[in-house]
């Protein structure tokens, strides 16, 4: 049987596969264009996302929107999701068992979307999706290919919040992604 986007959203909305279901306010399903060629994958919802049930609605979301705008993209053209659908308390790194419990949702989102390009936002996503020894500082902006999909990674927008000088470098990565599209 093939699940639909609505099925996945329904499962995520009542998921209790890991203890984060006890501390979350709202799970955060991916959002965006279900026909998009470009899929962004970050690590986990932050506090604002936990409150609103939507990805990238806080400070990092503003930076992401600026990056997209500077490269001629907008959210309506892409699909954005996270490895974890629930907020880890205190924004700590996702635990292995949480990533494992949540992975089927990401797999299904990827299966339904069939993106041409996947961009991992930050170390946690890059190490989970591309390679466990991925070094974001050295390897951001590099590409690998799997089946019919090109994968790359860049810094998470929250890294720009901590160090605004990274903006230009992430913008360059995004502009290369747009060229590839
Ligand atoms: N940070 C993330 O990794 N994901 C979000 O959705 C928001 C902030």
Image: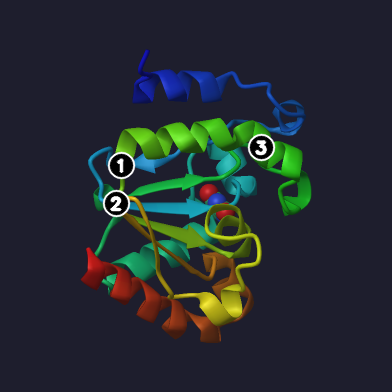
Crowd rating for badge 2 (residues with CA inside 10 Å; few <14, some 14–19, many 20+)? few
Q: Residue at x 77, y 29 (%)?
A: 19
Mark positioned earlier in the residue sequence (2 or 1): 1
Q: Position of residue 87 (x, y in %)?
A: 66, 42
Note whether 144 is above or below 98 in the view shown: below
For label 2, the residue is 148
Q: Position of residue 107 (x, y in %)?
A: 47, 36
The answer to whether any part of residue 175 appears in the image is: yes
Q: Nearer the viewer, residue 125 or 78?
A: 125
Mark positioned earlier in the residue sequence (3 or 1): 3
In space, the residues marked 3 and 2 are separated at their CA atoms by: 24 Å
In the picture, which quadrant includes the N terminus?
Answer: top left
In space, the residues marked 3 and 1 are separated at their CA atoms by: 21 Å
> Mark 3 falls on what kind of element?
helix
Mark 3 vs 2: CB contact within 8 A: no
Mark positioned earlier in the residue sequence (3 or 2): 3
For label 3, the residue is 100
Q: Position of residue 5 (x, y in %)?
A: 36, 25
Crowd rating for badge 1 (residues with CA inside 10 Å; few <14, some 14–19, many 20+)? some
Mark 1 CB within 8 Å of ligand 1? no
For label 1, the residue is 114
């Amino acid at each position: 049987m093939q699940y639909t986007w609505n099925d996945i959203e329904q499962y995520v909305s009542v998921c209790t596969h890991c203890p984060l279901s006890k501390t979350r306010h709202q799970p955060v399903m991916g959002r965006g264009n279900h026909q998009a060629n470009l899929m962004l994958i970050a690590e986990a919802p932050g506090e604002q996302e936990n409150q609103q049930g939507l990805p990238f609605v806080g400070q990092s979301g503003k930076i992401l929107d600026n990056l997209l705008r500077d490269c001629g993209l907008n959210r309506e053209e892409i699909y954005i999701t996270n490895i974890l659908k629930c907020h880890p308390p205190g924004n700590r790194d996702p635990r292995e068992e949480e990533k494992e419990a949540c992975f089927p949702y990401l797999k299904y989102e990827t299966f339904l979307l069939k993106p041409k390009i996947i961009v991992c936002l930050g170390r946690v996503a890059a190490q989970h999706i591309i390679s466990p020894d991925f070094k974001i500082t050295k390897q951001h902006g590099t590409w690998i290919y799997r089946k019919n999909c090109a994968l790359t990674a860049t810094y998470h927008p929250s890294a720009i919040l901590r160090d605004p000088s990274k903006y230009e470098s992430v913008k360059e990565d995004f502009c290369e992604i747009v060229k590839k599209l």
